[in-house]
Amino acid sequence: MATEDARYRLSSQYRLWSFSPAKLRDLREKTNALVRPHITARLAELKPTEPAPEFLTAEEETVLLRFFTTELIRAAIHCDLPTEIRATAAVFLKRFYVTNSLMTYPPMDLIKTCLFFGGKAEGYFAKLSKLAEKLSDTTEEKILAGEFLLCQGIRFAFDVRHPFRGLEGAILELRRQEDIDKPRIDAAHQQAREILKVSPLLTDAYFHYAPSQIMLAALSLADRGLAERIINSAFAPTRREEAGRNADATATEMMHPTSSEIKEKVTAAIEACRDMLATEPPERMETYWGKAESLKLIRPLLKKLRRCRDPDKADLVELQRARREWAANASKEKEAGQDRKKTNAGLALGEPIGPNEPKRRKVTGPSAADDVFGGALGQ
């Protein structure tokens, strides 16, 4: 039977959306650099007398994306969406803006699309009309306008692995331990769950770590002792360790990594994830984001974003209508081309018989069956 780690490595989250910090930073810098020439050219055409705008840097886009993720979380809470749907929608938003720039597609419009499509991906079918009513300045058309664009941006990878279920399993395991006080477990459970609702979504934890590592990092922030208890219980002695006591151990057995070696690697990853989550504790949603201190940083960036936005893609509704019109015209041209081919093929065999043209007379005569070329035509 495959291990949890082996199953995770088969998922689209690992295969398509797992990066090292250096690789993720490189992707964001390339995305930022690629959009600048196009936007510069378009703005020069539309506003030839104005100088070229100052573009957002990749680092500034990352800061803004974190701000827009907080807005998504608040909108999801306002719409009473379940925890996993909030998380899935936030992951979709962050994935989309790895290979798309905030300067290209409007993030506030994509937030609404992510909320709706996140529910669909998790099997929670919220009524589109109700969602549009709860979100300000929103119509059903606005929500749906970016849906296919979002699917393309996330590479049609709709499966998102979250750490919430792993936390519930860890808590059940801790409750089996008679020497641990129940109030301590309950407090750690509540705190870890609150961390998982916010911290991994505002950071890049989903890009760098497995769900189990994120879960243990959150539990470690809530209660380091309980997290270490889970980690220690997960590593039993391996065959190599047992074989080390046996003089007849085979070479294959000696090649297996020891549990201490695996534990060392896992612990290092969990500690790194823990440090990342600690930069965005859930309390910052109330004490920092949306407050004067954060707005002092965000407002100049939003102003900068408005000046360097791609004019061709600022309105997703109009963009969707234009694409549909183009697709309809392309389909008509294709059908017309097929009709022309049929007509040309018919003319190559002679003029087609029209509906009012008299039918040609059949070949008749007593010698018709005997003559290999048929009988003579009647006068």
Image (cartoon, rainbow, N blue to C red):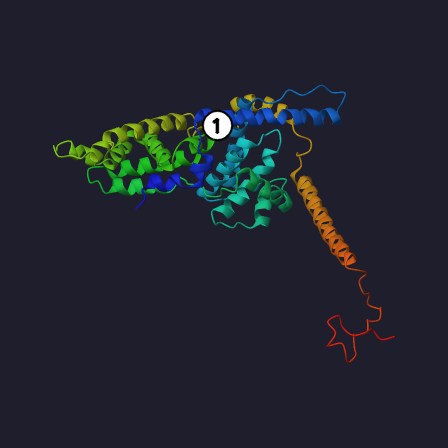
* Quarter holding residue 222: top left
Horizontal placement of 30 versus 16: left or right?
right
Horizontal placement of 362 versus 231: left or right?
right
Query: Residue 84: x percent and y percent?
Result: 44, 42
Q: Is residue 86 visible?
A: yes
Query: Residue 2: x percent and y percent?
Result: 32, 44
Query: Residue 194: x percent and y percent?
Result: 40, 35
Element type at mark 1: helix
Give amino acid for label 1. Leu
Report the residue at 24% width, 35% height from top. 235
Q: Is residue 167 visible?
A: no
Task: In this rendered view, identify the residue nearer to me: 66 or 333.
Answer: 333
Q: Is residue 54 above or below residue 173?
A: above
* Quarter holding residue 276: top left
Q: Is residue 53 above or below residue 214?
A: above
Query: Residue 297: x percent and y percent?
Result: 55, 21
| Label 1 sits on residue | 24
Task: In this rendered view, identify the residue nearer to me: 248 or 344.
Answer: 344
Task: In this rendered view, identify the residue nearer to me: 304 or 182.
Answer: 304
The C terminus - image quarter:
bottom right
